[in-house]
Image: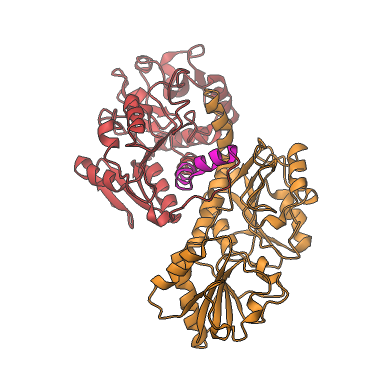
Chain colours: A orange, B red
Amino acid sequence: MNAILLAITGWDPLEWDARFRALPSGRDIRLWPDRIGHAADIAYACVWKPPHGLLAQFSNLQVIFSLGAGVDALTGDATLPAVPLVRIVDADLTMRMTEYVVLQVLTIHRQQRRYNAQQRQRVWRELPQPAACEVAVGVMGLGVLGAAAVAALSRLGFQVARWSRTAKRIDGVATFHGSDGLDAFLARSEILVCLLPSTPATDGLLDHALLRKLRRDGALGGAYLINAGRGRLQVEADILAALDDEKLAGATLDVFATEPLPETSPFWTHPKVTVTPHAAAASVPSALVANVLRQIGHFERGEPMDNVIDRVAGY
Amino acid sequence: MNAILLAITGWDPLEWDARFRALPSGRDIRLWPDRIGHAADIAYACVWKPPHGLLAQFSNLQVIFSLGAGVDALTGDATLPAVPLVRIVDADLTMRMTEYVVLQVLTIHRQQRRYNAQQRQRVWRELPQPAACEVAVGVMGLGVLGAAAVAALSRLGFQVARWSRTAKRIDGVATFHGSDGLDAFLARSEILVCLLPSTPATDGLLDHALLRKLRRDGALGGAYLINAGRGRLQVEADILAALDDEKLAGATLDVFATEPLPETSPFWTHPKVTVTPHAAAASVPSALVANVLRQIGHFERGEPMDNVIDRVAGY
């Protein structure tokens, strides 16, 4: 009874099974699809992209834990049981996302792609370089990941602003919210960092109409997009069009509408595009497993759990 | 009287002349070599790599200001008048060096060169990625630049240690010093960041004997060198040998024994080397000029100046 089911696709489920067994929890661990046992034993499900309909068959299910930050694959399952849905967010994941955002913003700011091209041509030429305090970065994103990225970029001296769907206050950071605030936010941002979740309200948000509103006459002399949120946010044909008509000077994309990115995608070879394989902030298994077990303890003692998803808002 | 002489090689002296004239200082600005006027008028010299012997001819010279951080070209001039020698260091320059160090450390840590190579081959593969807290970075460098880099890397979660020639205390940072501390410092550092000045004690320091002592069995699985100090610190044949015998897994070099880097240098095309053209932390002219004029004001009022060089130590 009170068994933990692991239902994982895309990642190696046996590795997760081993990690859960490695921690001294005394829990009964079941593994979909081959080692479920009695369905009625399952109290907790730890999942990544489980097939739609799977979780509906566990009548005693009490909590669903998403092992990755993106829960859109879950909330898109109309048959998902109406139990608490918890996103496992650990400090390690936040640090990794911060590393990725800082690396990619600095790569754009310090013109490293141009320096790499100069190196290939054996050209020794220092490029005019604005200071970080002249460069406006805009971060779209809620919660812990967005706040950490904003803090790290601010400490490096960038002019950082943040946009969220609903009003937020962050000391010392310009904040914009809602559709009313979006145009002003875009008009001052030269580098747009997108860390938004995929929801009905955000899917397709990164289209040509949005990208053309970014600031192009700032210190960098062009507008740049970094998307480390979800692939469904981006209209990929529009990103390519914006690169080609110079509304965008560059795009750094970690996520795509279809993953793995198909070999035929023009993003692979586009001279203004950096592709990373959804590697911005991978979950670190051992930390996540410890977090799941800790949260199950909270739940069983009647204490609140962290990062419970609002099923209506989708994040 | 009390005129300011600009003696600049390598950069465009007319641009510096225009910047000094643009600020409302009321100062008499002279320009070497064509517009020196009476040598006895010169009280202050603002220089970058002036020819040896030049400054000895100004009998009323009171202060020499170095417009760049490296003063080795000056201290190597045996005829340099024994007046205060001031290195112009401004906050902007420190921020730029911090940006460069953070960018290059994150590029190594997050394996961006491998991801770039994968992109060229249309390969979608997430690489195993240690957390920053598993990676040991060692910063060699005194003063403001080193301290700022250490602080920024520590905030990103790296295990940061610092080595300096003489003992220093920094709260929360492991510090090593002197030749006694060097081996232990190298043995724990997977990424070595060199921000040292060029002095008789540091020239040639980055040789094979030193590089082979870096930690190669850490989280990154190899040792990396970032040199944004001075080119004379590095024995370039030894760096190439260390790359070839895998004592080094990569080198990111902003400075070279000969600059511009000759077209025939193997660094340009070495698959493990990133070359940038002494662009880590360019002086921003307008900020530097304001700083010089402010310091002349301090001097004339009998107040202490900042960043006066110890002529014996060479920094």
In terms of depth relative to the viewer, which is nearer, A314 or B154? A314
Tally the marks: 0
In terms of depth relative to the viewer, which is nearer, A254 or A30? A30
List x then y, in percent, for residue B204: 29, 28
The secondary structure that dominates the magenta segment is helix
List x then y, in percent, for residue B244: 35, 30
Q: Could you tell whether B176 is left or right of A208 in the image? A: left
What residue occupies the far right of the structure in this picture? A209
Q: Is residue A252 above or below residue A121?
A: below
In terms of depth relative to the viewer, which is nearer, A246 or A7? A7
What residue occupies the far top of the structure in this picture? B34
Residue B137 makes an appearance in the image:
yes
* Residue B152 lies in the magenta stretch: no
What residue occupies the far left of the structure in this picture? B180
Q: Could you tell whether A59 is left or right of B295 in the image? A: right
Q: In which quadrant of the rendered image does the C terminus of chain B lie?
A: top left
Residue B84 makes an appearance in the image:
no
In terms of depth relative to the viewer, which is nearer, A304 or A290? A290
List x then y, in percent, for residue B271: 46, 31
**Residue shown at 73% from the left, 61% from the top:** A202
* Residue B110 lies in the magenta stretch: yes
List x then y, in percent, for residue A8: 56, 67
Tell me the quarter of the picture where residue A182 sits.
Answer: bottom right
Q: Magenta part of the protein: which range? A: B102-121
**Residue shown at 71% from the left, 57% from the top:** A232
Tell me the quarter of the picture where residue B81 sits.
Answer: top left
